[in-house]
Amino acid sequence: MSFSQQQQEQLSSIVEREVQRRSDTDHLKLLSIGFYIQSGISLLASLYGLLYIFLGMMGGTGSRPGDPFPMAIFVGMGIAIFAGGLLMAALNLMAGRSLTRKQNLTLIQILAGLSCLNVPYGTALGVLTFMVLGRPTVKALFEGRDPYGPPPPGTPGAPEEGNWYRSQGGGF
């Protein structure tokens, strides 16, 4: 059984679109998992803030006895580290959920940039996020459009010519 040139081109087009769709879906899923892991790392790092708070409350700073200033610095630093870690954990969790829902592109891009500061894991996560989100097909997914287009006319299951465009909001 042999295929005509037109049939081979149609089949090739269908296969290319399906490969791109699967690639985009898999990469967004992996990035989502990466942001969940980054969230866990941020949560664990925030626990260092509790250590500073504890040291400040105990007063073991080595300064003059009865001087409250160094203790207040430790407690303040501990609160800032703990609150910052919790905030980053929550934002990374939101970014992971947003990737699976294909929403909040700006939030994801901001957190990808901030992740680049966490060497080496966060840097890899941030750079790969920018690479995946830079694809036109992924941008279209976040905009709610079908980036893969209709199947070529004449293939089984393809809409009649012109109907796909109208179903996407186009037409007169």
Image (cartoon, rainbow, N blue to C red):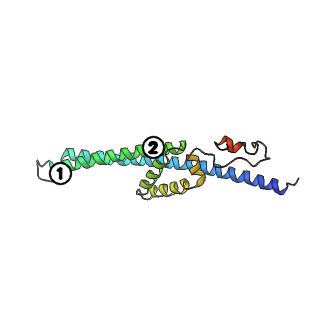
Q: Nearer the viewer, residue 19 or 159?
A: 159
Q: Residue furthest right?
A: 1
Residue 164: percent from left, percent from top = 70, 43
Count neighbours of disc 2 (C-alpha within 10 A) and say few if under 14, some if 14 to 19, many if 20 or more.
many
Count neighbours of disc 1 (C-alpha within 10 A) and say few if under 14, some if 14 to 19, many if 20 or more.
some
Residue 153: percent from left, percent from top = 77, 47
- Do the numbered discs 1 and 2 sit on residues whose CB atoms are within 8 Å? no
In the figure, is residue 51 to the left or right of 63?
Answer: right
Residue sitting at x 55%, y 49%: 30
In the figure, is residue 104 to the left or right of 79?
Answer: right
Number of residue marks: 2
Write down the residue under mark 1: 70
At numbered mark 1, what does the secondary structure look like: helix, strand or loop? helix
- Dot 1 or dot 2: first in sequence order is 1
Of badges 1 and 2, nearer the viewer stands 2
Q: Nearer the viewer, residue 143 or 125?
A: 143
The Cα atoms of the two marked residues, 1 and 2, are separated by 35 Å
Residue 102: percent from left, percent from top = 54, 44
Residue sitting at x 75%, y 45%: 161
Q: Amino acid at mark 1?
A: Pro
In the figure, is residue 138 to the left or right of 70?
Answer: right
Residue sitting at x 65%, y 43%: 168
At numbered mark 2, what does the secondary structure look like: helix, strand or loop? helix
Q: Nearer the viewer, residue 51 or 105?
A: 105
The numbered mark at residue 12 is: none
Q: Quadrant of residue 159?
A: top right
Q: Amino acid at mark 2?
A: Leu
Write down the residue under mark 2: 93
Residue sitting at x 18%, y 52%: 61
